[in-house]
Amino acid sequence: MIRMYSYRILTKEYNQMILVTDKLREAVRESGIQNGVATVMTMHTTTGIAVNEALECLESDIANMLEKNAPEEGTYSHARMLHDYGSTAGNPTGHLKSYLTGNHCHFYVIDGELIQGGAQDVYFCEFDGPANRMIKIFIDGE
């Protein structure tokens, strides 16, 4: 059996980490699936999905690491006129940060419960906001 859930997220900042662990747990409970796999995926190329410990100091360290690896003042090939869009691409760092975090994660579901490590939480990462975003949660099992 497969269940799919969609959640809208309205981000408020250009770069932002938002916990979505509770949305994942809610979807697992609602699905009725007892044993299987849950996948969280972002539907955007300038956002990411990350699994880590939910600590403000660690969030700050992650943001600093991403900024060092994709600085806003860098020179990027993507920062050019995109005729298909009719505008100049101004979000190359969003694409690069998304590439670094990835766009999905997987967790096991056993006996109807999400299986996670003691310090594992799921973040939706915005790298080109504020924006109206969407994540999908797929739960596959029995």
Image (cartoon, rainbow, N blue to C red):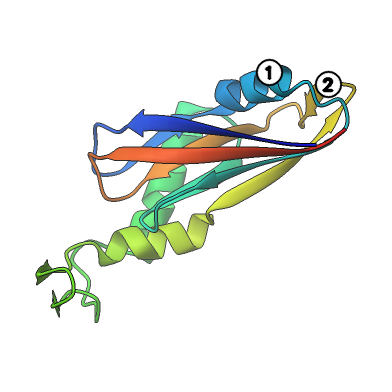
Residue 117 x %, y %: 77, 32
Residue 42 x %, y %: 48, 47
Quarter of the figure with the C terminus: top right
Q: Distance between the residues labelled 1 and 2?
A: 10 Å
Q: Which residue lies furthest to the front in this view?
A: 1
The vertical placement of 87 against 58, above or below, is: below
The vertical placement of 102 against 96, above or below, is: above
Q: What element carries label 2?
A: loop
Q: Which of marks 1 and 2 is in front?
A: 1
Residue 22 x %, y %: 58, 20
Q: Nearest the camera: 60 or 97? A: 97
**Quadrant of residue 34 in the image?**
top right
* Image disc number at residue 112: 2
Q: What residue type is labelled 1?
A: Glu
**Quadrant of residue 134 in the image?**
top left
- Callouts 1 and 2 close, C-beta under 8 Å: no
Neighbours of disc 1 within 10 Å: few (<14), some (14-19), many (20+)? few
* Image disc number at residue 30: 1
Quarter of the figure with the N terminus: top right
Q: Is mark 1 on a helix, strand or loop?
A: helix
Which residue shows up at 39% across the image and 46% down it? 63
Q: Nearest the camera: 31 or 19? A: 31
Residue 82 x %, y %: 16, 76
